[in-house]
Amino acid sequence: MRSLPAAILLCLLAACSEPLPPPAELGKLVVVTRAGPATYQVDENGAASGFEHDLAVLFARELGVEARFVFARDHAEIVKMLKKGRAHLAAAAVAPGKSDALLFSRPIREVQQLIVQHEDASPRVRTPADLVGRAVMVLSRSPQIAALDALQPRPEGMQVVKLKGIGELELLERANADPGMLAVVDSAHFEIGANFFPGLNAALALPGNRPLVWAFPKDGEAELFERAETFVERIRQDGTLARLADRYFGHVRRLNQNDAVQFLERIQTVLPRYRRDFIEAQHQHGIDWRLLAALAYQESHWDPLATSYTNVRGMMMLTEDTADRLRVTDRLDAQQSIRAGARYLADLREQFPPEVTEPDRSWLAIAAYNLGMGHMNGARFIASLVKRDPNYWYEMKQVLPLLSRPEYYSRLKSGAGRGGEAVIMTENIRNYYDILRRLEKPAVEAQAFSMSSMSPM
């Protein structure tokens, strides 16, 4: 029996016609997915992450097997692979539909389907009537097709152009390059893509929210489907699903169009002056230079002479006390400021208990960078009062605003704090970091931590 899994996997790679045995017999849960920021992606260190990836890994762990991912170019290929039994399930932002060959799980999350148009486009789309005679681009066999089909009455002469072999971000990139093009994507992908293509607008929301699910071959193992249903319901009830969704989608709505445009422009014009300083700080303190750059941009917009009304100053906006403690002689010296800010952030990360794991440890440390550790510890105490888990950023970003309410801060030695401001700052930094990770190369020779390489919750 020990040789069976290897033989079966060899057959899978060779595209054999025999369906897979159950996961328990194979020793692996074979999951078909698609590459994309909302599903599965691999970082520069070879570490896989993504909402669907992490969810499938958790499910495989519950089954006592390893998750193995195989890839499809588009939704049509996913359906084909499931029908032929080459995967146990599809975790790829699938929408339920009418099918004699597939089973669909209970909803994992819901999204809106959006018609996207460049801001310079003319004529503008504002109502379904504006789609009369227009061509609309969608991914082949995608949930967006059903959303367009549900338009009643259907706009006369509307053409649905189905594109194969590309992903959502590539579709958005095409729409960004061609002002005459209309595209349909779900709200999660649009919000991610809008940070890279800020010229795009959500022109029209199609009626109703659409559930996204896992798909299974109907003639597959019945017990696997039942266990998946139980798993999805359990993680919904215990908060795991909400925390996982927040990790990938909870921050993407924060940047407005002007913020994104300005950030992309300064990546080209300002960041090159300081890139070496951020990379050297990574070498010293083990924090990805792009995260340090994202923090610095939020603090000062990469202005080494920045000064606030509270007298925090410099690239990393250090207080006088913090600068003295870190032996900074000139807060307006960019190199000193970046190194000190990196050290301060690294020190904050180390102050959380071991049960706080990445990426939550880093998001909490960044909030503490803004608030101070005293206020963060006070917020962690408040979390225990309001039955929130202080070890997760998703929970704490709902607690931190309570620091401004007297019924809570009156119990704390640290007093009142601007917790809501810290939440906004941290969420902005998450967005800036996402953009920098896609546009800027890592400092591969440094031994930096990788948040996406950490085990899912």
Image (tube, rainbow, N blue to C red):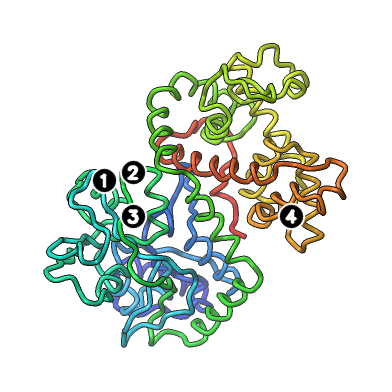
| Rendered image quadrant of residue 265 | top left
Tell me the residue that label 4 is attached to: 390
How packed mark 2 is, by other alpha carbons closer than 10 Å (few <14, some 14-19, many 20 or more), is: many
Query: What's the residue type where badge 2 is placed?
Result: Phe
Please tell me which of labels 4 and 1 falls first in the chain.
1
Q: Amino acid at mark 1?
A: Asn
Image vertical order of residue 23 relative to residue 248, above or below: below
Callout 3, which amino acid? Ala
**Judging from the image, what secondary structure is the residue with disc 1 in?**
helix
- Whole-angstrom CA distance, mark 2 to mark 3, is 12 Å
The residue under the point 32% across, 67% down is 206
Quarter-wise, where is residue 321 in the image? top right
Query: Percent x, y for residue 254?
Result: 50, 47
CA separation in Å, label 2 and label 1: 6 Å
Report the amino acid beneath label 4. Answer: Pro
Give the residue at mark 2. 197
Residue drawn at point x = 63 percent, y = 56 percent: 394
Q: Earlier in the sequence, mark 3 or mark 4?
A: 3
Check disc 2 and report its element: helix, strand or loop.
Answer: loop
Q: Quadrant of the C terminus?
A: bottom right
